[in-house]
Image (spheres, rainbow, N blue to C red):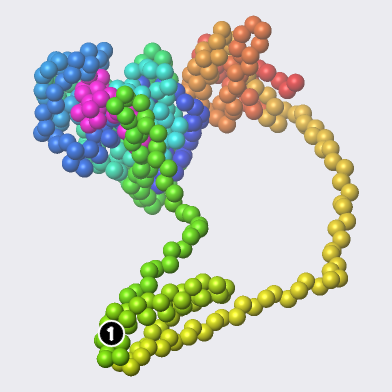
Amino acid sequence: MVIDARSGEVLHSRNADTRLHPASLTKMMTLYVVFEAVRRGELSLDQRIKISKRAAAEPPSKLGLKAGSRIQLRYLIRAAAVKSANDAATALGEAVSGSEAAFARRMNRTAKAIGMGRTTFKNAHGLTETGHMSTARDMTTLGRRLFYDYNDYYHLFSRSSIDAGLKVVPNTNRRLLANYRGADGIKTGYTRAAGFNLVASAERGNKRIIATVFGGRSTATRNAKVAELLDLGFRRAPGKAPVRKPKPPQYIAEVAPNIGSDGKPKAGKTIRLLTAVKRSLRPKARTVVTTPTDDAPQSDVIIAMNEIVKQAIAEASTVQAVVPTPEPQVSGSASGLSLVENTERKTVKPKARPAKLLQASVKPVAPQPAVQKVVRRVAGTGKKHWGINVGRYGSRYAAERVLLKTALTEMNTLDGSLRKVSKTSRGYDALFTGMTRETAELACRRLAARNHACTQVGPS
């Protein structure tokens, strides 16, 4: 995968969405989340982190941290970025989220927020684990994010060596940094399952190119391929391109489960957000207080008033109207009281439906016979109906791995072809299809010159 880092434009890609083992490229996301935590104030660079037994027991590459010891956060960041130390990466994850499992969940949440749609993290260091997968496209996206979102830390990836607290450690990417003009990062990765991986960035003039390679056979061949991809990027990138910085991550709010004392999730409460009104409660009548007169004592006036109001409410409840009848208004004087009558609203009845009502007739539409199209393939050497077979293997994984290595080895002639694994009774055939006859012949000649097995496959 090759992109113009300024605009994010893809300049070249092949199998960029194939999910593979990222190895220590994982630490780019580990560092991204740690940088985010420091920016939010969750941690400080000078904070001393206690090393757990789990972190200290991680296999090499490692810094050599001892369980129970304390070290500043800044040195853990340096060790993970430059030395690719697994013990430092685990310690960073535990410092941010309390445990590596919780940190992996935060890594996945961050990956979704920045558009890494085909990546799943299981740990902070990148050692092989079931389900821990990523793609060249996602890792290229992450490399660009590191440059723009946390440019203050980006210089770490270009250091040939750095002080990591316990000792000065060399950069695992120092050969490319020393031999390719303009290279300034970013991260290497290797496991037996993943091969030699690298996300590289280089700047020349006003151009910045990011290239990613998965599955290299060795450090030398991987660096050579990355250099070839970076050269391709600088050739294809325009002299002037708009700088489109990525937008801030769009996080989706997560709801923590309601866990009971037994450790199991409790049943959630049902909340009724919207419901129809089934009963309208009428407010109580307001007590009317008036000044007593000589003819009517105070108690008699109040009793008479209440009786009148109750009678008016009972009568109003029998009236059906579109708009509720307003409460009766009472007026009184020293000599007596009178009730102001409410004006009743008459209901409007709809007109009766006509006795003779003609309905439109709908004639059934006869089903149309299905038209069958016959597709014929035009044979010819100029059509892309040819391919090559680069070997038969005992498993699908082995065939896919050979296809990937071959595609990286012979990019010029295999550009635009499709990788395919065909299962037969004798094993799994590794095929490149969608080629012209001339291209297939050229690819086989070039692969044979490198001692690669290759058989030309014609249209069937």
Q: Is residue 281 left or right of residue 89?
A: right
Predominant secondary structure, magenta span: helix
Question: Does the magenta-highlighted stretch encompass residue 110?
Answer: yes
From the viewer's side, name the closer residue of 455 and 199: 199
Is residue 75 something one can see in this rendering?
no
Per the rendered image, the range of residues in magenta is 83-111
Picture coordinates of residue 281 (x, y %)?
43, 63
Picture coordinates of residue 260 (x, y %)?
32, 29
Residue sitting at x 11%, y 25%: 71
In the picture of the structure, the residue carrying the numbered disc 1 is 297
Residue sitting at x 64%, y 6%: 426
Residue sitting at x 36%, y 48%: 247
Residue sitting at x 34%, y 34%: 258
Is residue 383 something one can see in this rendering?
yes
Q: Is residue 266 left or right of residue 401?
A: left
Name the quadrant of the C terminus. top right
Picture coordinates of residue 7 (x, y %)?
40, 47
Q: Is residue 242 left or right of residue 396?
A: left
- Amino acid on which the number 1 mark rests in the picture: Pro
Would you call the spot at circle 1 few (<14 residues within 10 Å), some (14-19), or many (20 or more)? few
Quarter of the view holding residue 333: bottom left
